[in-house]
Image: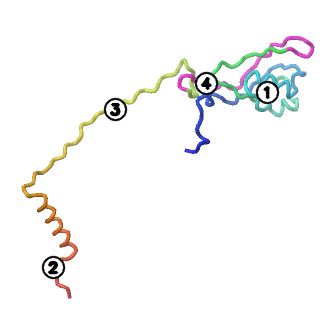
């Protein structure tokens, strides 16, 4: 398998998730400010075009790579330019379920069921019936050789 498909166990829990920041004050809509907020959640990747153009001001939307093996941040506190402390709620559009026990997506640790250990059935081996021979092995090989040579050249057949 090519080396590009080999993953480290630590990397498999990282996944991109859209985070919504409802009622974010307009002074925080600058890409640098959104990047700082996003970096508190994980690794900021992008913002959607409506957020970038400030065409929908009811909430800002950023794409962040988060570690799903850890609890996601549901709010972030920061100080606004006017000195007021803002407790900003964070809503994730989709929260992937990741199991920290088996390192798979689709369920959480609490509902993880270890894989069943396959049972191996031991079937009896078939018995081979060996026919005893009264002829020595050398004679058997000679008879076989004579038979094979007869197929190649039959002395009873006339050549015309």
- The answer to which of 113 and 103 lies nearer the viewer is 103
Which quadrant would residue 140 be assigned to in this image?
bottom left
Q: Earlier in the sequence, mark 3 or mark 4?
A: 4
Instruction: Please give the range of residues in magenta.
Output: 79-102
**Which residue in the structure is indicated by mark 1?**
61
Percent x, y of residue 119: 35, 30
Instruction: Name above or below for residue 130 compared with residue 115.
Output: below
Residue of label 3: 120
Numbered badge on residue 155: 2
Q: Position of residue 149 (x, y in %)?
A: 19, 72
Precedes in sequence: disc 4 or disc 1: 1
Indicate whether 6 appears above or below 77. Answer: below
Question: Which mark sits nearer the N-terminus, 1 or 3?
Answer: 1
In the rendered structure, the answer to whether residue 156 lies left or right of residue 32 reads left
Q: Please state which of the two labelled residues, at mark 2 or mark 1, is closer to the viewer.
A: 2
Q: Residue furthest bottom?
A: 160
Q: CA distance from mark 4 to mark 2?
A: 82 Å
Q: Which residue is mark 4?
A: 97
Of tags 3 and 4, the one toward the viewer is 3
Bin the neighbour count of mark 1 within 10 Å (Cα to Cα): few under 14, some 14-19, many 20 and up: many
Q: Name the secondary structure under disc 4.
A: loop
Q: Are marks 1 and 3 in contact (CB under 8 Å)?
A: no
Residue that sits furthest to the left in the current view: 134
Say if mark 2 contacts mark 1, CB within 8 Å: no
Front position in the image: 81 or 18: 81
C-alpha span from label 2 to label 3: 58 Å
Tell us which disc is closer to us: 4 or 2: 2
Q: Quadrant where the N terminus lies?
A: top right
């Amino acid at each position: 398998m090519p080396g590009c498909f080999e993953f480290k166990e630590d990397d498999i829990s990282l996944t991109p998730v859209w985070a919504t920041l409802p009622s974010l004050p307009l002074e925080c809509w600058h890409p640098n400010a959104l990047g700082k907020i996003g970096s508190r959640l994980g690794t900021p990747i992008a913002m959607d075009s409506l957020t970038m153009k400030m065409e929908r001001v009811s909430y800002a939307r950023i794409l962040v790579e988060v570690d799903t093996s850890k609890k996601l941040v549901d709010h972030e506190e920061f100080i606004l330019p006017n000195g007021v402390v803002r407790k900003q709620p964070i809503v994730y559009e989709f929260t992937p379920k990741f199991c920290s026990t088996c390192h798979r997506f689709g369920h959480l640790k609490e509902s993880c069921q270890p894989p069943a250990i396959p049972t191996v059935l031991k079937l009896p081996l078939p018995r081979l019936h060996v026919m005893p021979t009264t002829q020595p092995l050398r004679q058997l090989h000679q008879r076989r050789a004579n038979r094979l040579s007869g197929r190649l050249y039959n002395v009873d057949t006339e050549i015309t």
